[in-house]
Image (tube, helix red, strand yellow):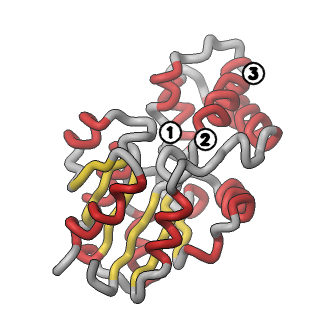
């Protein structure tokens, strides 16, 4: 891989296996308003969107007061179960980040639907804060797939879109990266199936972290 690159990662479903944590919080949110919890696949399909947008998509007929109650219950449940067991790194994630961080002139970033508080907690929990040159989260930007997060990451690092890659597990990540003119790489172990990532226009798909670095090389090497 050539120098002068920016690789931006999504968090939930890409670096961190947070599905049990998220599903428990969604269950608490729906219980708070007396609603039946949506099926697992439907609930996980909104992961990656900013939380208010995700909950509104799961309960589109609920008014503002009900959505506020869901939001509060979700945050309370999520905070109550924070810990390494609740949101472990996927196998190979740390090693891949270490290998990328060791490459000269390559910068790493994050673009996540998490809040700043949630992202800070996760980075400190796993000791990953020093790996990233730019951290973009839901507190500061419109929800994915709006490209504001990755445009800010490009501006913060001085990278050009043609020398940057968005890595994520959802069509929201792929659409966001493409909207900013970046390369995109979909990971198939997260919350959207490979067929959806391909249909969204992902430049490459990988089935494990062992294939990530070679795929990045193929996407942007030699440019």
Res 2 quadrant in image: bottom left
Q: Which residue is mark 3?
A: 32
Residue depicted at 67% across the width and 23% down the height:
27
> In the image, residue 207 lies at what x, y percent?
35, 45
State the CA–CA distance, disc 2 to disc 1: 10 Å
- Which callout, 3 or 2, points to the residue nearer the camera? 2
187 and 208: which is toward the camera: 208
Res 38 quadrant in image: top right
- The numbered dot on residue 18 is 2
Res 82 quadrant in image: top right
**Can you name the residue that lies furthest to the right here?**
80
Left or right: 42, with 147 as reference point: right
Q: In the figure, 24 relative to 186: above or below? A: above
Left or right: 120, with 199 as reference point: right
State the CA–CA distance, disc 3 to disc 1: 20 Å
Q: Which residue is mark 1?
A: 47
> In the image, residue 212 lies at what x, y percent?
35, 59
Residue depicted at 20% across the width and 48% down the height:
201
Residue depicted at 44% across the width and 73% down the height:
100
Mark 2 and 1 residues: CB-CB less than 8 Å, in contact? Answer: yes
Mark 3 and 1 residues: CB-CB less than 8 Å, in contact? Answer: no
The secondary structure type at the circle numbered 2 is loop
The secondary structure type at the circle numbered 3 is helix
């Amino acid at each position: 891989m050539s120098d002068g690159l920016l690789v931006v990662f999504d968090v939930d479903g890409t670096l961190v296996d947070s599905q049990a944590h998220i599903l428990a919080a969604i269950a608490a949110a729906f219980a708070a308003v007396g609603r039946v919890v949506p099926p697992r696949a439907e609930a996980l399909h909104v992961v990656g969107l900013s939380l208010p947008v995700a909950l509104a998509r799961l309960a589109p007929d609920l008014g503002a007061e009900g959505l506020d109650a869901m939001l509060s219950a979700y945050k309370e449940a999520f905070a109550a179960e924070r810990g390494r067991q609740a949101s472990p790194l996927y196998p190979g994630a740390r090693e891949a980040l270490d290998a990328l961080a060791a490459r000269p002139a390559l910068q790493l970033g994050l673009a996540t639907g998490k809040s700043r508080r949630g992202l800070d907690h996760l980075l400190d929990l796993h000791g990953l804060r020093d790996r990233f040159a730019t951290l973009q989260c839901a507190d500061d930007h419109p929800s994915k797939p709006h490209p504001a997060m990755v445009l800010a990451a490009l501006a913060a690092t001085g990278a050009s879109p043609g020398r940057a890659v968005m890595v994520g597990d959802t069509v929201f990540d792929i659409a966001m990266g493409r909207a900013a003119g970046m390369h995109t790489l979909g990971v198939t172990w997260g919350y959207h199936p490979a067929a959806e990532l391909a249909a969204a226009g992902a430049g490459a798909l990988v089935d494990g972290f062992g294939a990530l670095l070679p795929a990045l090389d193929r996407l942007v090497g030699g440019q």
